[in-house]
Amino acid sequence: MVASQLILDDLEDLLVRFCAPDASGRIPTGACTHGVHWHAPVDMCATYNAKAEEIGRDLALSWVHLHDKDSVSRIAGMSLQALRARVEAAPRGALVTMKGKSEHSRSLSRETVLKALAAPPSALLDALGASAAPDDAWRAAAPRATAIVDLTRQIAETGEGPPTWPVCTSTHGHIHFVKKHPPFHVRRLASGGVVLATHPYCSLWPLWANALSALGLMS
């Protein structure tokens, strides 16, 4: 869990540095992946949007990519209105398959995407923020992990403190815990943008599925 906190912090920082190196806002969206391809944003481990009110772009980009098979890198620069039109052009009742654990999260419908795009952006952001709340297992481990992170940083800065040693964070137990209790961050930026992030072992889809379900938009 200590490694997970550090990874999330570094992941968000890296994404913001690449996508928003200044206040120009010239990069509308971006994402992080452990692979070589830009997949559906909701399947990635982190996304950036220059305008928080356009957070629905992640959902629309994902739909068009999965349904129409368009490369995300080719359509990422489309306006939100153009993406909405692409979703609307799909047949009524059209679905794309998602990698969800629960029944309601195993697919994403055209109607759900359109309803999400029609919802007030503030409601969507609030639902994502609420859905990012850690579960009981994560909350129980958080104080100890935070203390270790703070102490490690203190030692690195001052050179003073108890001895430290490297540990392996790719054990089966660690990976299983992170995947079972994925951490999520919804970070509002001073620039007006927003970053969604989770551990690289995980995807943002559970966060989106829970938020859409909480708003009653899953169909």
Image (tube, grey):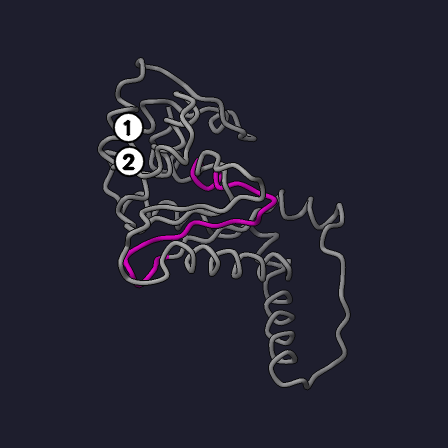
Amino acid carrying label 2: it is: Met
Q: Looking at the picture, how far across and down is residue 141, in whole percent? A: 63, 60
Crowd around label 2: few <14 · some 14–19 · many ≥20 (10 Å): few
Residue 165 sits in which quadrant? bottom right
Q: Quadrant of the N terminus?
A: bottom right
In the rendered view, tell whether residue 146 sits above or below residue 58. below
Judge by depth and name the residue closer to the eye, 48 or 196: 48
Element type at marker 1?
helix
Amino acid carrying label 1: it is: Leu
The answer to whether residue 193 is left or right of residue 65 is left
Q: Looking at the picture, how far across and down is residue 133, in whole percent? A: 47, 52
Crowd around label 1: few <14 · some 14–19 · many ≥20 (10 Å): some
Label 1, on which residue?
114
Q: Which mark is residue 78?
A: 2
Write the start and end of the magenta stretch as one range.
188-210
Is-magenta flag for residue 190? yes
